Image (spheres, rainbow, N blue to C red):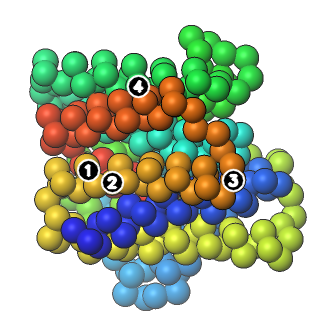
Amino acid sequence: MLLFVASSSLFGLMAFIAKLASVRIPGAEVALLRFAVGFVPILLIPSIRKRSFAWTRLDLLLYRGFFGGTAVLFYFVAIAHIPVGIATLLNYLSPVFAGMYAAVFAGEPLRARIMLPLGVTLVGVWLVVTAGAHGPSFLGFGKWELVGLLSAVCSGAAVTAIRIARRTESSWAIFSSFSLFGVVVTAPFAIWSWVTPTPYEWLLLVLVGLVSIAAQMLMTHAFRWVQTLIAGVISQLGVVVAMFLGTIFLAERLTPRSMIGTVVTLAGVVTVIIVSKERCADEIEP
């Protein structure tokens, strides 16, 4: 369990470092370089490379890679424009959408008892984002908050593809498709708005990739001993870490209303995980 706590904390730390890097570097560029760094072990280690490209269901891996890459793109763009804690909170709503997609595309039942925690989650999110929406709003959601929400929508689709793909694909095959298609998805936007990083920014960008790899490896290792249900609940620690670091080191304002909304949202998401027994940590892997 300690390994999973460490993994979730590292994912929160990764979001914080991405926020530091995106002070001047566009979010799309940060996302591209995050994927590029993550792809290095696949290219350099022969044993990993062989397993990474042993693909069986190309269609599912394409869905996973495309939606996963798009989710990270939206997530990092949101991080660049709104407080890192709020961006992370919105991204971590993916279990809610994953449950909906699984009901539609994987034939999994959508239990009636999931509707109450789903409603609680939505109320919590509304409390958080309306406490300080950035830019013109729609139902209280600023455009960058909506981008963060879209990251969860896409992440939920990617998680659904993962759950189906696991029947035939290895973990490395799924990871390689995520990295490869992530590069493809983010590259056009990153190149279009490219800003040459300074040495300090290069350090931050490399750290984003390295920390995400470390978090992913710890998570994969921890799944040998931690039940899926417990893992999904612990993964929400990433939101707390990102929000804490943003508040302490970036002076991001956390109002009483947003704090209440955060607690309500996390409680709703955790309840959704418990009721649906979804594995939500797989995609936070950005």
Q: Position of residue 111 (x, y in %)?
A: 12, 23
Q: How many marks?
A: 4
Q: Are marks 1 and 2 in contact (CB under 8 Å)?
A: yes
Mark 2 → mark 3, Cα distance in angstroms: 23 Å
Q: Which mark is residue 232?
A: 1
Amino acid at pointer 3: Leu
Amino acid at pointer 1: Gly
Q: Secondary structure at mark 2?
A: loop
Q: Earlier in the sequence, mark 1 or mark 4?
A: 4
Q: Earlier in the sequence, mark 2 or mark 4?
A: 4
Residue at 68% x, 68% y: name it.
205
Q: Which residue is mark 2?
A: 235
Query: Label 2: how many residues lie within 10 Å, few (<14), some (14-19) or many (20+)?
Result: many
Q: Secondary structure at mark 3?
A: loop
Query: Label 3: how many residues lie within 10 Å, few (<14), some (14-19) or many (20+)?
Result: some
Amino acid at pointer 4: Gly
Q: Nearer the viewer, residue 194 or 85?
A: 85
Task: Please tell me whether residue 230 is drawn above or below residue 90 in the rendered image.
Answer: below
Q: Position of residue 192 (x, y in %)?
A: 82, 48
Mark 1 → mark 2, Cα distance in angstroms: 5 Å
Mark 2 → mark 4, Cα distance in angstroms: 18 Å
Q: Which mark is residue 124?
A: 4
**The quadrant where residue 155 appears:** top left
Q: Earlier in the sequence, mark 4 or mark 3?
A: 4
| In this rendering, the label closer to the viewer, 3 or 1 | 3
Q: Earlier in the sequence, mark 2 or mark 3?
A: 2
Amino acid at pointer 2: Ser
Q: Which residue is mark 3?
A: 250
Q: Secondary structure at mark 1?
A: helix
Q: Are marks 3 and 1 in contact (CB under 8 Å)?
A: no
Q: Are marks 2 and 3 in contact (CB under 8 Å)?
A: no
